[in-house]
Amino acid sequence: MPVAQPSSPSATAVKTDVPARLDRLPWSRFHLLIVVGLGVTWILDGLEVTIVGALGPALQNPQTLHLSSANLGAVASCYVVGAVIGALVSGWVTDRFGRRLVFYATLIVYLAGVLLSAVSWNFWSFALFRMLTGMGIGGEYAAVNSAIDELIPAKYRGRIDLIVNGSFWLGAAAGAAVTPLLLDQSLFSVDVGWRLGFGIGGVLGLSILMLRRFVPESPRWLVTHCRADEADQTVKKIEQDVAASTGRKLPPAEGSLTVHPRKSFGLGMIFASMLRKYRTRSILALTLMVAQSFLYNSVFFSYGLILSHFYHVPEQHVGFYLLPLALGNFCGPLLLGTLFDTVGRRKMIGGTFAISGLLLLLTALLFGAGILTGVTQTAAWLVIFFFASAAASSAYLTASEIFPLETRALAIACFYALGTAIGGSLSPLLFGWLIGSGSSWMVSIGYALAALLLLVAAVTEWKFGIDAEGKSLESIASPLSSHE
């Protein structure tokens, strides 16, 4: 029963075992539905980024949108800027009004953007609709990452976060596989195939709307926002589902937490937590986000142009080079994910950033010297991104688990937004200009800069990293509501 606390902002203190009850659950069908219903977001993002990257040369055709390399870089930056705006708005709304509301709103924005992209008629319309699409995808990041962390048991959280974030590459693989067909002029005319590519994302997005009805509101969020009874009922339903699907009696929950719920938590309180008490954690999250964002936006928004301009790969064959690259990226989080829960966060995050940085530096030198071919360049990326994809996924894991519950979505949004604004919005413009120079050494300087950022991120993780493996979210960062 709640205990009266007149001095508390909410007038009551609530002793709850909701976090302990969620963390002691065995893996079940319920958790799989959560992963599928929420994790498809990253598949959509991967599909979007890869299709635009692979279709880049086709969009330069006078019969399509007749875009220049600089135009393509600007469009990529518009998508990223939209994602930043969407993440910030979504992060605030998610922490204030709940995770579930945002699932549907952001998906609708995404669907509108991607379907409008398919009917673009010039550079400006395409850039505007790509920005709208980015707003939907960016909005999903804050709500989905926070919800997954709050619903998945502690001992599985690291590997599941990595695999879910790594599922971006399943979408990338799908985009790479379908692009050669879309660009095959014996199947579709030159101005039709690329439009159908965006329609694929729309169809997939509509299917997700049906899956999300299985995803409940986060009980952790409910209990800290004056809805303890609803949180208890939600956990009871989850427990019944898990017990029925596993056929096992659930172990007793151990431990409880006393919170002082509020209807809302002011931005002053939230930012004071992030910038004062958790200042070094904020530096860590921002550094990891900037490094991974610069790397991925540098490579995947421009790789179609690299293959076309430097290796003379026909535009309809670009997808064949991206497909193995995408599958290799997914294998990294899939095969290394368990180690983040066993070997530990600090060692694995620092190690994957360092290895990918050193390999990228070597590849930059080989590219600048003209030693690589389209095939060997792709093979080099495959090895680099096996480690870099796990590192990038761990950046989102870090931002989502090292801050208090009441700030989680906004923290993810802020560091995603800052990381993407610094690393993601600038890199496509930079590489569009570097590729336009026609010099392989100029492009290699861009790759070397990305490698340096990865190595800085590795050092920062080793210095400020948190050993969060197997721990409850509340023990990593106590909720703001646990203090009067």
Image (cartoon, helix red, strand yellow):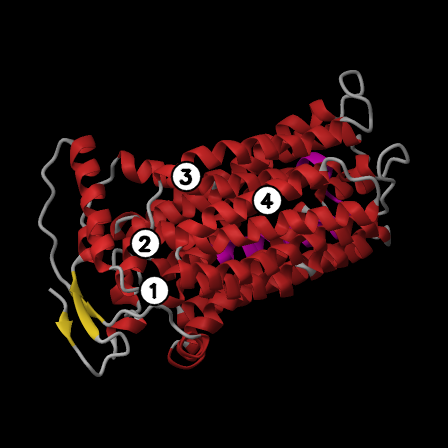
In the picture, the disc for residue 405 is 1
Name which of mark 2 and mark 4 comes first in the sequence. Answer: 4
x and y percent of residue 160 in the render?
36, 45
Between the C-alphas of marks 4 and 1, the distance is: 26 Å
Residue 246 picture quarter: top left
The answer to whether marks 4 and 1 mark residues whose Cβ atoms lie closer than 8 Å is no
Q: Amino acid at mark 1?
A: Leu
From the viewer's side, name the closer residue of 372 and 167: 167
Residue 365 picture quarter: bottom right
Name which of mark 2 and mark 3 comes first in the sequence. Answer: 2
The answer to whether marks 1 and 3 mark residues whose Cβ atoms lie closer than 8 Å is no
In the image: residue 467, left or right of residue 256 = right
Which segment did they paint magenta? Answer: 352-376
Q: Which residue position holds label 3?
A: 212
Seen in the picture, residue 75 relative to 350 is either above or below; the reply is above
Q: Which residue position holds label 2?
A: 150
Name which of mark 3 and mark 4 comes first in the sequence. Answer: 4
Q: Secondary structure at mark 2?
A: helix
Q: Residues within 10 Å of mark 1 (few under 14, many from 20)?
A: many
Q: Amino acid at mark 4?
A: Tyr
Tell me the mark number nearer the camera, choosing from 1 and 3.
3
Between the C-alphas of marks 2 and 3, the distance is: 16 Å
From the viewer's side, name the closer residue of 47 and 256: 256
